[in-house]
Image: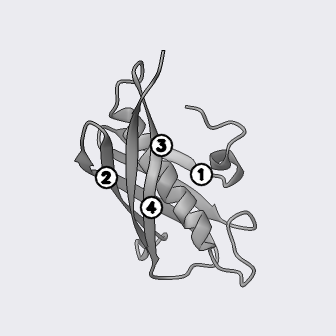
């Protein structure tokens, strides 16, 4: 996986499970991911969500002929968290020829919902 020297590495994101149509990753809530008021930064949650969707989408394409890129993402931040680890579970809702839609739920250690996100991924033909 291409993680070294990326935002994934910088935020401490750890991919813990990969299967067709489902990805699970964790991220610490610490000095790298908190906003100035001491709670998890919404942007960090969105970065985690898009990372999960991107990795999941990439697992569903022909890697020799296709790549993926985020096309649109939205997120609802429903609960704050000050410390610990959050877990993102991404599942594919739609797998088309040119787009994929992913549902991502981010929860805390007690499985309380922190953020819910939907991410649309573009499937791009690689030019040779």
Secondary structure, mark 1, is loop
Task: Determine the CA span between mark 2 and mark 4.
Answer: 10 Å
Circle 4 or circle 1, nearest the eye: 4
Check if mark 2's residue and mark 4's residue have beta carbons within 8 Å: no
Task: Determine the CA span between mark 2 and mark 3.
Answer: 12 Å
First in sequence: mark 2 vs mark 3:
3
Secondary structure, mark 3, is strand
Q: How many marks?
A: 4
User: Looking at the picture, how far across and down is residue 71, in whole percent?
Assistant: 44, 52
Circle 4 residues within 10 Å: few <14, some 14–19, many ≥20? some
Circle 2 residues within 10 Å: few <14, some 14–19, many ≥20? many
Which residue sits at x=70%, y=76%? Answer: 35
Task: Determine the CA span between mark 3 and mark 1.
Answer: 19 Å
Quarter of the image for residue 116 reads bottom left
Residue that label 4 marks? 73
User: Looking at the picture, how far across and down is residue 63, in whole percent?
Assistant: 41, 24
Residue that extends furthest to the front in the rendered view of this protein: 127
Which residue sits at x=38%, y=34%? Answer: 59
Task: Determine the CA span between mark 1 and mark 2.
Answer: 21 Å
Q: Is residue 23 left or right of residue 96?
A: right
First in sequence: mark 1 vs mark 2:
1
Residue that label 2 marks? 101
Residue that label 1 marks? 13
Circle 3 residues within 10 Å: few <14, some 14–19, many ≥20? some
Q: In this view, does 36 lie to the left or right of 43?
A: right
First in sequence: mark 2 vs mark 4:
4
Residue that label 3 marks? 69
Secondary structure, mark 4, is strand
First in sequence: mark 3 vs mark 1:
1
Task: Determine the CA span between mark 4 and mark 1.
Answer: 18 Å
Q: Which of 41 and 12 is in front in this view?
A: 41
Q: Is residue 9 above or below residue 47?
A: above
């Amino acid at each position: 996986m291409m993680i070294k020297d990326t935002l994934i590495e910088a935020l401490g994101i750890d991919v813990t499970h990969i299967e067709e149509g489902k990805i699970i990753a964790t991220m610490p809530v610490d000095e790298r991911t908190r906003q100035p008021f001491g709670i998890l930064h919404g942007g960090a949650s969105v970065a985690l969500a898009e990372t999960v969707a991107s990795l999941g989408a990439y697992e569903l394409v022909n890697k020799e002929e296709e790549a993926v890129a985020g096309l649109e993402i939205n997120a609802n931040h429903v609960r704050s968290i000050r410390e610990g680890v959050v877990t993102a579970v991404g599942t594919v809702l739609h797998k088309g020829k040119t787009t994929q839609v992913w549902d991502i739920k981010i929860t805390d250690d007690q499985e309380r919902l922190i953020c819910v996100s939907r991410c649309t991924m573009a499937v791009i033909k690689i030019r040779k």
